Image (spheres, rainbow, N blue to C red):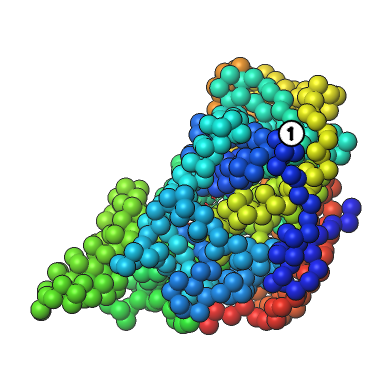
């Protein structure tokens, strides 16, 4: 199948406006006769559901949590970007576009990114109108902070709870429609398959997670907004429930998957503490506005710190290596995430890691306490303030900005980050890869859309901070509601879609068979046993550093593990009850297939990009090859079962951007 991105002709900056002016519309009276299923009610699915219902479509929204408010989006801490230029520091639509494409290692679809930058400003207005309490400055205007890989302050935030506040905004917009009967909300329902009729997506099979009942739901179009699949690594910053099932099921029914192996490795997570951990915790990137990252300069100090014989606070400035500031003076601690992650790993691999596992660097706020404290002392008119007074005043400012993050760190690590530097290490955080979509956000299956983190999206090989919320809300509030009409305009006479068809029978049977297998298998290992093993293979062999030999081993090991899973997995409890282990079994089964495709994707990429580096190409020749490939490597797209993965290479169309080395010096 030839892929057609359907990017409209014309200058980049006019594409979206011209396109909207010309696409088909569905008139308000006809929208009443059209049903749309939205799987997922995080920021992407929640905003899409609310907007589609507001437009007049009948929406059926599904989420496996007990409320849309509990979607993983709630975890987002740091902020959301928009090219508003409120700080007057030179921001513009073009700059946001440029930063995003460059930050993604020139592997994004430019037309989508330009559109994203264009609508970013509307998102903020929309959310403010909903009452989202963005931080404001002294004069009452919306405040901004800076995130990695950019030289402006364009990030809007609500303390360290931006995702939660935005989600409450989308949720209230949804609730208005739920009350009107325009959204039918199916909480605690998990989509387990999509139903394709005559080549078009016409419904889903879902399991009621409370009663175990298997249900058929039909619609004229299906939108998947099921979030990212970082939990394929077992340990990640994602919510425990985040999974690939919806995206994987649609892939198996014909939706292509793009860039599966591009994963964002976030530099500022709380380091792993041992083998019995089930979750990693993010310390927001916003902390890099005020925290300085360092390791000791001398290995002797590293040894003493690890043995508990020296404290980091006892090291003088001369004894510290602020390696990001040293290597990237223009961006300092705010280089993009992939650059910061790779630099931390490089220092730790060289033996400078500061905790017992050797996998931690410091994130230190001492300089900010002094800087803010001195400023506050002046503002308050204190003459000759003591060192302690200055520190206290500075800490108060830092607390106001990041208080909840500091509290979270202290609870998890049991160390007071106001007294001693935080320890951080890179961890799996976001999946750039996902379901391939065209300019309309439609997958390769007609009538089947994919939005938010679940699609392969706008971020190329690496996502800049505060851009996932922007993309999810752009997709849901401002892009899909237009583009879906272009497709649905042909469905105004179709009438209700029946669920009493062989296609629904077949899909339902496959779901029931798989559930029966899990309940009756009575194997010897838990689902987590397999998930942990998969995660270890993924991190060791498909993590930040990859090589051909390791990837080939990973492919074989994942395949063996999958066979073992289907022989020996044990799922307690029954099918007709709330059974979390059963739900997990299905999700891990899908991770075990995705993992293999992931490793195959990584294997064929003769490149280092984003958070990953191929060891074979860490040479001057390899780097030269990599730069050359900027011109040729785009989304690498797959079809079919993992074992038959077919690779396509499609040249990127560089319209305005001059491709050059991505330099953060
Ligand atoms: C700790 C953390 C902090 C972050 N901070 C930021 C930040 O500051 N700024 C930023 O831009 N980004 C941030 N991100 C990234 C951002 O939060 C996510 O990329 C984004 O929220 C994803 O939104 P989504 O709507 O695509 O998916 P999600 O919020 O993950 O929602 C997925 C939805 O799909 C549903 N679902 C999934 N599978 C099924 C199924 N099979 N059946 C039915 N329903 C299903 C779920 O119930 C849920 O409603 C952060 C991520 C993490 C982990």
Q: Position of residue 128 (x, y in %)?
A: 45, 55
Asked which quadrant contains residue 377, the reply is: bottom left
- Left or right: 46 with respect to 483? left
Residue 367 visible (yes or no): yes
- Left or right: 211 with respect to 365? right
Residue 281 visible (yes or no): no
Q: Nearer the viewer, residue 280 or 463?
A: 463
Q: Position of residue 559 (x, y in %)?
A: 73, 42
To which residue does mark 1 refer? Answer: 33
Instruction: Residue at 61% x, 34% y: name it.
Output: 182
Q: Position of residue 395 (x, y in %)?
A: 24, 64
Q: Position of residue 521 (x, y in %)?
A: 67, 21
Q: Nearer the viewer, residue 550 or 215?
A: 215
Instruction: Residue at 29% x, 59% y: name it.
Output: 400
Asked which quadrant contains residue 541, the reply is: bottom right
Q: Nearer the viewer, residue 514 or 578?
A: 578
- Kindly give the residue lying farthest to the left in the view shown: 383
Instruction: Residue at 33% x, 71% y: name it.
Output: 301
- Left or right: 649 with respect to 657? right
Asked which quadrant contains residue 54, the reply is: top right
Q: Which secondary structure, mark 1? A: loop
């Amino acid at each position: 199948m030839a892929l057609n991105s359907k990017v409209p002709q014309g200058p980049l900056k006019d594409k979206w406006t011209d396109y909207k002016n010309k696409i088909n519309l569905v008139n308000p009276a006809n929208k009443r006769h059209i049903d749309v299923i939205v799987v997922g009610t995080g920021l992407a699915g929640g905003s899409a559901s609310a907007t589609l219902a507001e437009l007049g479509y009948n929406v059926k929204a599904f989420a496996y949590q007990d409320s849309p408010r509990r979607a993983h989006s709630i975890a987002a801490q740091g902020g959301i970007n928009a090219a508003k230029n409120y700080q007057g520091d030179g921001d513009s639509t073009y700059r946001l576009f440029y930063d995003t494409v460059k930050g993604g290692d020139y592997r994004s679809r430019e037309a989508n990114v330009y559109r994203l930058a264009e609508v970013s400003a509307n998102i903020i207005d929309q959310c403010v109108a909903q009452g989202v309490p963005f931080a404001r400055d002294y004069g009452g205007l919306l405040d901004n902070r800076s995130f990695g890989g950019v030289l402006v302050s364009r990030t809007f935030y609500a303390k360290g709870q931006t995702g939660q506040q935005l989600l409450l905004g989308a949720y209230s917009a949804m609730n208005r429609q739920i009350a009107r009967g325009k959204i039918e909300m199916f909480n605690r329902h998990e989509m387990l398959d999509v139903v394709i009729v005559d080549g078009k997506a016409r419904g889903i099979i879902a399991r009621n997670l409370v009663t175990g009942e298997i249900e058929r739901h039909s619609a004229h179009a299906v939108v998947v907004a099921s979030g990212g699949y970082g939990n394929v690594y077992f340990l990640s910053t994602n919510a425990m429930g985040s999974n690939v099932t919806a995206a994987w099921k649609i892939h198996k029914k014909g939706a292509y998957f793009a860039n599966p192996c591009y994963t964002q490795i976030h530099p500022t997570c709380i380091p792993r503490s041992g083998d019995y951990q089930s979750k990693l915790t993010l310390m927001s990137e916003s902390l890099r506005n005020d925290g300085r990252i360092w390791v000791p300069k001398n290995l002797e100090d590293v040894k003493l710190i690890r043995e508990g014989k020296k404290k980091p606070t006892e090291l003088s400035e001369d004894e510290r290596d602020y390696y990001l500031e040293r290597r990237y003076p223009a961006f300092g601690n705010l280089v993009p995430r992939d650059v910061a992650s790779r630099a931390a790993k490089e220092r730790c691999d060289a033996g400078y890691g500061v905790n017992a596992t050797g996998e931690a660097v410091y994130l230190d706020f001492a300089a900010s306490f002094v800087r803010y404290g001195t400023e506050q002392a002046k503002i308050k008119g204190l003459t000759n303030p003591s060192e302690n007074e200055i520190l206290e005043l500075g800490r108060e400012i830092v607390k106001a900005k990041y208080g909840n993050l500091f509290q979270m760190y202290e609870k998890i690590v049991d160390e007071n980050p106001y007294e001693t530097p935080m320890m951080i290490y890179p961890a799996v955080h976001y999946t750039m890869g996902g379901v391939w979509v065209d300019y309309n956000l439609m997958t390769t299956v007609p009538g089947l859309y994919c939005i938010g983190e679940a699609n392969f999206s706008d971020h190329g090989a690496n996502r800049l901070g505060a851009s996932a919320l922007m993309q999810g809300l752009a997709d849901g509030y401002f892009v899909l509601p237009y583009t879906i009409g272009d497709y649905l305009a042909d469905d105004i006479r179709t009438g209700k879609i029946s669920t009493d068809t062989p296609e629904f029978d077949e899909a339902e049977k496959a779901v029931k068979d798989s559930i029966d297998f899990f309940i009756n298998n009575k194997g010897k290992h838990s689902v987590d046993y397999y998930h942990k093993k998969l995660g270890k293979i993924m991190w060791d062999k498909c993590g930040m550093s990859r090589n051909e030999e390791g990837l080939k081993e990973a492919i074989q090991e994942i395949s063996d593990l999958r066979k073992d899973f289907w022989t020996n997995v044990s799922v307690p409890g029954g099918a007709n009850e709330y059974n979390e282990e059963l739900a997990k079994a299905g999700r891990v089964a899908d991770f075990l297939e995705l993992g293999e495709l992931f490793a195959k994707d990584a294997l064929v990429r003769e490149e280092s990009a984003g958070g990953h580096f191929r060891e074979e190409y860490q040479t001057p020749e390899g780097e030269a090859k990599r730069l050359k490939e900027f011109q040729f490597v785009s989304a690498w797209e797959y079809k079919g079962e993992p074992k038959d993965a077919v690779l396509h290479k499609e040249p990127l169309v560089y319209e305005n951007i001059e491709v050059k080395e991505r330099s953060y010096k």
